[in-house]
Amino acid sequence: MSQDSANDAASQVLALVHEGWAHLKFQRPLAAWASWQRALRLSPDDRAAQQALDHLKSADELPETARKERRFRNPTSAEARTRWSEKFAGRDLSALPDAIDAFSEIIAETPNDIDALENRALCLAWLGRPEAIGDLHRVTELAAETDFDRAVEAAKLGEILRQGAGAEPYANEFSDAVDLGKTEHTSPKTLYEQLKRREYLRRLPSPRDHGDIHVDEWLDRPWPENSGTTHTLAELPRVLGLVLSSDNVFRVSSPDASSFWKVAATLQSLAPDLQITRTPLPLPMLDAAVWTIRIPEWVNEDDRHRLYRENVEDYYENRWINIKRAGLLNLSPLEAAQKTDAPTRARLAATIAIREELAARPGSVELYQGYPFDRLRKRLGIEPDNPDAVNAEETGSMSGSELDSIDPGTLDDHSLVEAFQSAAALGNDSRTVRFASVLVDRKPSVLEAVNLKDLFAPLIRAAIADGDEELAQRRIDQAIDLDQTFGDGELYAEFTVWKAELLCGLEQPDAATEIYRELAESGQQPGADTPAWIAYDGATTLYDAGYADHARTLAELTLELADAEENDEAARETTVLLERLAESEG
């Protein structure tokens, strides 16, 4: 080999090594592996390429599926071997574009050639192209009935590829962010100060190289005091979003979509000029939404481990099962579990398996505290891989059909609370009411461990559906009393709005209007609402119910409150409502 040829080969190798690192940076580990393998084919002794491959193999922060070496499958019949040989003649399959062309020609003639589909998917993945996801989806569809494990493996690989750059439309896990854009209405500093007055912000150390940026965790409740008592999971704060702020910047981000949309709603009530973006999460952070819980440093090690485990159980068995996922064709795991076709079962099995891989990483073992994902399978009504890993009598991880077979009156207090919470997370009111109607009559101290909104909402809905308005009102009053006892009145405003809405539906607009007025003027608001928004909510509720005069009364109050709050958005919305009222009278 001439010196020029040697230099050219060395340049190619170096370019491939850099290309591989770029792929890895953009969450395309299969493409990174392929680039480094091509470098080694050109220079088998290249140290940089070998070190890069070794790094990927040992990158235990990634799920195992992202690091697994993959090879082409061979055709499984004599007919297929003949067909493949014809298409491969004169082609170098180590050149991935040529291999893609060959497999594409095979697939064009025999669309159900599962081996050709899987091989083309690998070629596309090795090049970092998101079209691989479609081929893997097809492999899962074709293999699920006859080779379930193969279908699951294809779906698992698809789960990894979905997070790569270029595959954003197919991603499952995101970091959502809201930024304050250029506006004449609100400055970043003003918005931060408004948020700080209303919400629970906990200051963190500023980034070392960005001293002008302040970092806060936006919590869903106050940071707990060190009282020396054992904390329950429900008492601990969760991070709704990470707040970055300065004189010129305001940004809130979160890996938990359910929390983020609450954040966005709050911010939109304070500033109209917001920009929302979604970015796929890096592979090492696919389970970031699990870890929004915050445990104070004074909690002892045993309690910390218990809370870690309870947090994992609560997240996966009550929240995660209800989140729609692209990898499940926009079904939630709970919805997918109710399907009987083999491809959906394979996709669900793959989704759970990737979560198991995340929990098995060395850096995650302490956080997951040995959580057996067979609990999650049982919760979804799927046969566990290892039935001995789960307690069949534990109501907290029961499936819907298991809960339906239980007599709530026979359960002890602890099991009844868990059964109610389990039923509520499955989202079926008739099932939830069976447990809630028994639980609400247990001694008040039992209810301390229960979310009162979750407890009373289905009971009130059931009473209204049965036409028993008197019972519905009693339930709301009972909720308010219990909230005063256990929750220090945190939910008073929200329960009071429920009462106003009920009275409006019962054709008692005077009483409903007075409740909205008193609530708005008292300064007590549910959630992120301000007094102006409470009055506006009352005005629109009464308007929709056909009580124009009452709606106008509250709309005029809204304008007064909006002026005092300098709430331009509430004023604009109310002006539109008043115009609609005037048009209806005309």
Image (cartoon, rainbow, N blue to C red):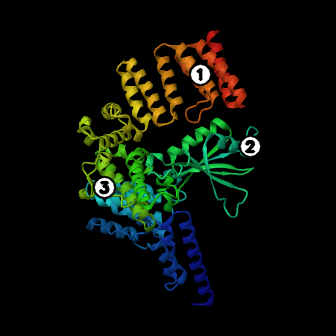
Question: Alpha-carbon distance for marks 3 and 1?
Answer: 51 Å
Number of residues whose C-alpha sits closer than 10 Å to that of mark 3, classed few (under 14), some (14–19) or many (20 or more): many
Residue at coordinates 31% horizontally, 50% vertically from top-left? 345
Q: Position of residue 482 (x, y in %)?
A: 44, 32
Query: Secondary structure under badge 2?
Result: loop
**Vertical side of 234 occupied by 362: above or below:** below
Number of residues whose C-alpha sits closer than 10 Å to that of mark 2, classed few (under 14), some (14–19) or many (20 or more): some
Q: Amino acid at mark 2?
A: Ser
Q: Residue 187 shows which numbered tag?
A: 2
**Vertical side of 154 occupied by 401: above or below:** above
Question: Alpha-carbon distance for marks 2 and 1?
Answer: 32 Å
Identify the image quadrant of residue 8. bottom right
Q: Nearer the viewer, residue 86 or 47?
A: 47
Identify the image quadrant of residue 366. bottom left
Can you tell which of label 2 and label 1 is closer to the viewer?
1
- Mark 3 = which residue? 374
Dot placed on the residue nearer the N-terminal end, 2 or 3: 2
Q: Quadrant of the C terminus?
A: top right
Q: Position of residue 117 (x, y in %)?
A: 38, 60
Q: Nearer the viewer, residue 66 or 140?
A: 66
Q: Nearer the viewer, residue 276 or 211?
A: 211
Residue sitting at the far right: 184
- Mark 1 = which residue? 518
Q: Quadrant of the N terminus?
A: bottom right
